[in-house]
Amino acid sequence: MAECLFCKIQKKGYEDQIAYENEFFFATRDTYPVTKLHTLIIPKRHFASYFDMNADEQASVHQILKHQRDEILSIDPSVEAFNIGANDGTSAGQSIFHLHIHLFPRRAGDIENPRGGVRGVIPSKQKYNKK
């Protein structure tokens, strides 16, 4: 079986791909970015599901997400908002079975109507009427 891509990035010789790291996670820019500065937050420990994080990892992922948000905002002042998400399981679209959380910087006008945000994972559900 081929070595996990995200486990490989942590090895010597790939340091240039790591934008930031803490004790439990590292951040890298997405190779196929959806938006400029699209970042992946990846645990150093190999596990597939967001729900398999332990308490230390849960605190750590919050810290690194905030750090990367602040870094992105300092690099690109046109960023006004973020989407955060993870594909957890095959039916959710997960294709690399090592947890990775996407941090998508968003800018005014990057799509015609951003309303509904992450609801767009099911395109027919993105648009909705408030009750």
Image (cartoon, rainbow, N blue to C red):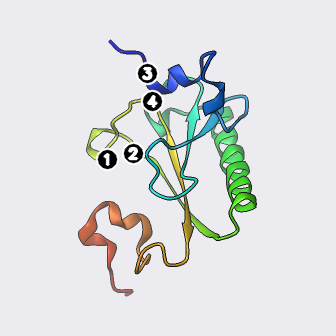
Kind of residue at badge 3? Cys
Label located before the other in sequence (1 or 3) = 3
Screen quadrant of the C terminus: bottom left
> Who's the residue at 43% across and 30% down the image?
48
Marks 2 and 1: CB-CB under 8 Å? yes
Marks 3 and 4: CB-CB under 8 Å? yes
Mark 1 → mark 4, Cα distance in angstroms: 14 Å
Of marks 3 and 4, the one in the foreground: 3
Label located before the other in sequence (3 or 2) = 3
Kind of residue at badge 1? Ala
> Who's the residue at 60% across and 32% down the image?
17
Residue that mark 1 sits on: 92
Residue that mark 4 sits on: 98
Q: Secondary structure at mark 3?
A: loop
Kind of residue at badge 2? Asn
Residue that mark 2 sits on: 87
Q: Secondary structure at mark 4?
A: loop
Q: In this orientation, which residue lies closer to the viewer: 16 or 118?
A: 16
Disc 2 crowd rating (10 Å Cα; few below 14, some 14-19, many 20+) is many
Query: Is 105 displayed left or right of 70 in the figure?
Result: left
Mark 2 → mark 1, Cα distance in angstroms: 5 Å
Q: In this orientation, which residue lies closer to the viewer: 125 or 77?
A: 77
Mark 1 → mark 3, Cα distance in angstroms: 19 Å
In which quarter of the view is residue 126 placed? bottom left
Of marks 3 and 2, the one in the foreground: 3
